[in-house]
Image: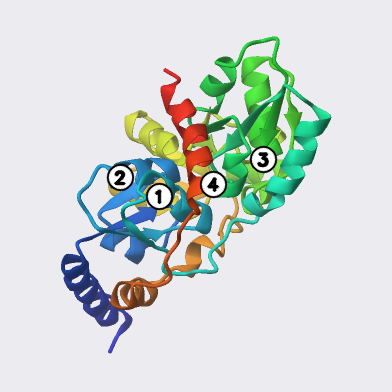
Amino acid sequence: MSIEEKIISLTEDIKRLKKERNAIILAHVYQRPEVQEVADIIGDSLELSRRAAETDADVIVFCGVHFMAESAAILSPQKTVLLPEENAGCPMADMVTAEALRAKKEEMPGAVVVAYVNTSAEVKAESDICCTSANAVKIVHSIPEDKEIIFIPDKNLGMFVATKTNRPMTLWEGWCNTHDWVTTEEVTKAKEEHPDALVLIHPECRPEVTAMADYVSSTTGLIKFAKDSEAKQFIVGTESGILHQMYKQCPGKEFFLATKRLVCPNMKATTLDKVKKALETMQPQITVPSQIREKALICLERMLEVK
């Protein structure tokens, strides 16, 4: 059986199992193309969980990483949440623990903790308000100016937000292993090779890299910009999986990765075989203890209240 035939066979099996389980499949835009193609909804992590919560599905299959599946469990406690690859984690999310955050809060009593959605449920439960890469600037703007801010865990996103809001913040020493790899030298080389291309960068990249961008935004924001732009070529500074959606949604346009190293091994850990197995066995299931879920939900709801 060829690779193409195997993909077709697995896709048919997944569609059958999905119907039997009354399941919905979510895929982050960093997932493998064939995994994105079998998904019902494709997008950013939190938006996927929010949209899944609005459906009547009994089962959520989250093709992403652990903290994303936790967010789905927080927003849909009545649904079964499956993470096809149980070990698909996020090194940046692991850089902040609830215990370490509690210690920092004791050092800075009264400070507002802004937690990037790329954190565990336990950390969200210790935080005051969540943010995404798309709304982080708006969330920080919403905090009274006389309040100190602890921004966790991504220092690169934090520095970008601090620049946009002119707000001093205490930044956690965390970063995305994939985005932090991008260097100014690589972007300069890409611009030399594609002089007519606009530079699109994710705010998890280093500040000196985002400073070189024509546009900085979340994954869905970058895709929308490329769709709406009159430009025909783009240099992309985020995980390689986004290219699949960019080419699908922007016909006739060209995209070039800022560096070939923009590959997240955790995002690529999910395969169609694992999606099928998850639906067959109803494992691995991701759950959040109720006492943690309730506190983490408040953190997320406060974010959603900011207009």
Task: Describe the element under mark 2 as helix, strand or loop.
Answer: helix
Tell me: residue 87, above or below residue 301: below
Q: Dividing the picture into quarters, in which one does residue 261 lie?
A: bottom right
Which of disc 2 and disc 4 is earlier in sequence?
2
In the picture of the structure, the residue carrying the numbered disc 4 is 292
Task: Describe the element under mark 3 as helix, strand or loop.
Answer: loop
Tell me: residue 283, above or below residue 192: below
What is the C-alpha distance between the residues marked 4 and 2?
Answer: 18 Å
Find residue 29 and report its horizontal and vertical position in percent.
Answer: 41, 51
Q: Note whether residue 96 is visible.
A: no
Mark 3 nearby-residue class (10 Å; few <14, some 14–19, many ≥20):
many
Find residue 288 and report its horizontal and vertical position in percent.
Answer: 49, 54
Asked if disc 1 and disc 4 are in contact, CB closer than 8 Å, the reply is no
Task: Describe the element under mark 4 as helix, strand or loop.
Answer: helix
Q: Dividing the picture into quarters, in which one does residue 233 lie?
A: top left
Query: 71 or 91: which is nearer to us?
Result: 71
What is the C-alpha distance between the residues marked 4 and 3?
Answer: 22 Å
Which of disc 3 and disc 2 is earlier in sequence?
2
Q: Which mark is residue 53?
A: 2
Find residue 179 and report its horizontal and vertical position in percent.
Answer: 62, 48
Q: Residue at x 31, y 52 (%)?
A: 78
